[in-house]
Image (tube, rainbow, N blue to C red):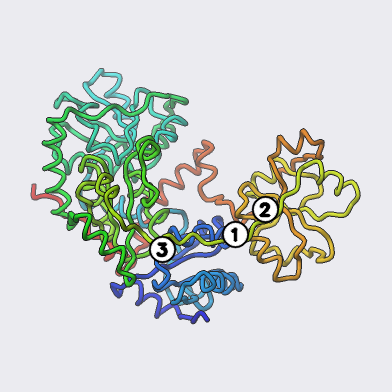
Amino acid sequence: MANYVDANTLKAWLSDGCEIALIDVREHGQYGERHLFFAVSIPYSVFELRLTALVPNPSVRLVLYDEGDGVAERAAARAEAAGYTDVHILRGGAAAWEAAGNTLYAGVNVPSKAFGELVEIERRTPHVTADELKAMIDAGENMVIVDGRTFAEFQRVSIPGGRSCPNGELALRIDAIAPDPETTIVVNCAGRTRSIIGAQTLIDLAVPNRVVALENGTQGWSLAGLGLDHGVSAPHPATATPADIDKRRERVRILAEGRGARFIEADELAEWFNDQTRTTYLIDIRDAAEFSANGLPQMTHAPGGQLVQATDHWIGVRGARVVLADSELIRAPVVAAWLRQLGHEAYVLVGGVHAVRELEAGPPARDLQVPLLPEIGAADLKALIDADVVQLVDLRPSMAYREAHVRGSVWSIRPRLAAIGLDPSSLVVLVSDEPGVAQLAAIDLAEIDIDDVRRLEGDVDTWRQAALPIIATPDLPADAECIDFLFFTHRRLVGDPEHSRQYLKWEIDLVDQLDEAERAAFRIAPAPEA
């Protein structure tokens, strides 16, 4: 049975140096509007599907919170049924945390973004404005623009003339991008964080070039009235020569150890996997193509730049051991150096992914089993609809429902299923993009005596071909009901200038919201003496 914890006790736990997983079980939109600084989002709608990856050790201290509406209690029961033994609930949820005098933060990846702002302040990372960069381009300066985001983001929108090289790849590939030490390197992202971290990475590596961040990234470029490219397809370049790699390898080891990261051998890692008192993550930080080609199932894949940018997507336990691996011992040490400064206990695996292949042990497999749900085809569903003997519940994202759904279906989400008034005596068909979402919803439906449940096969195109009536409702569900959708960031992503300005201001202002304990979580290396 889960125990309750008050806000003051939880505040102390977050700084006591012991492992803790603080999980926000509200839906993504609710989380993005206001959440605890160190919270990791695992919405109740997908709770069992994500819990073991983010919180792999069932004996870890696990704290769940919600809106004070009972969802955390339901999630706690699911966690305990899955074998978690130290489960707690924040009494009163997010509102109680705020009532105790603590800050609730808007947005996502908040610790990483606040960290980026602190790095710029404390390391005095140099930058240029969009207008200054445009003048450099017009003057024909010897320079290269490096986009530190993912390749998919770069393809969507980029600075004209920019080249893609995600931040996690910079240490390995920068010599091929800028072989001339006289070339100025400008690093950009969409906003601020990855511009700062990418530029500071190269400065910390002591590349001979002048390195600057593009202030406010592609958003700042657009706000300056300058045009952006779309659909650029050139991938990041190959690596540098072996001689350059050998030289860089020594430099990154010095950097990583100077930031507190330790290099470990495979036998020590094997011992950690057998230590059930601690949480150990093993992460392959190479790019997606490399992982796809020869990645190992016992490793989590998180591209290095994104692991720094969005650490809470992969690491759900504060105070855990995080072991990083690559294939050449250059990228992993750089990422470990950043994670150490972010406050994580990061290590580098000597031998990288090659060493993992030799391990007989690995992280314990803890995939949770969810009940299989029988499926129904679109043609069979149409017959049931025509006979008016079915209840259709659409569990897909609210924005997908607005765009197209089967007429007569009701949009809902797992934590609210009990409130939509389903008839236990009638068949319920669930619509979901992934089977697991429907399977989890069926567990909750069974608890309100709705047992005759199936999942609709196919997608919107399949349903149309089967002559199911497909309609759009642009305003339904109403915004207030779309608890899965984060309106906070949406409008700036569709080019709304005012929301871009607000978003950039939000990033900059994060530093001023930090309290002493939150600020103390970071260990930013001091700037060298001038």
Secondary structure under badge 3?
A: loop
Per the image, the residue denoted by label 3 is 56
- As measured in the structure, the alpha-carbon distance from the residue carrying label 2 to the one carrying label 3 is 27 Å
Residue 321 in the image, given as x and y percentages of width and height: 29, 62
Left or right relative to 326: residue 367:
right
Sequence-first tag of 2 and 3: 3
Which amino acid type is marked by label 3? Pro
Measured along the vertical axis of the image, is residue 422 above or below residue 137?
below
Residue 92 in the image, given as x and y percentages of width and height: 53, 77
Secondary structure under badge 1?
A: helix
Measured along the vertical axis of the image, is residue 384 above or below residue 189?
below
**Are the residues flagged by discs 1 and 2 in contact, CB closer than 8 Å?**
yes
Per the image, the residue denoted by label 2 is 395
Asked whether residue 357 appears in the rendered view, the answer is: yes
Sequence-first tag of 1 and 2: 1
- As measured in the structure, the alpha-carbon distance from the residue carrying label 1 to the one carrying label 3 is 19 Å
Which amino acid type is marked by label 1? Ser
Per the image, the residue denoted by label 1 is 45
Residue 33 in the image, given as x and y percentages of width and height: 52, 58
Left or right relative to 526: residue 101:
right
**Mark 2 or 3, closer to the camera:** 3
Q: Residues within 10 Å of mark 1 (few under 14, many from 20)?
A: many
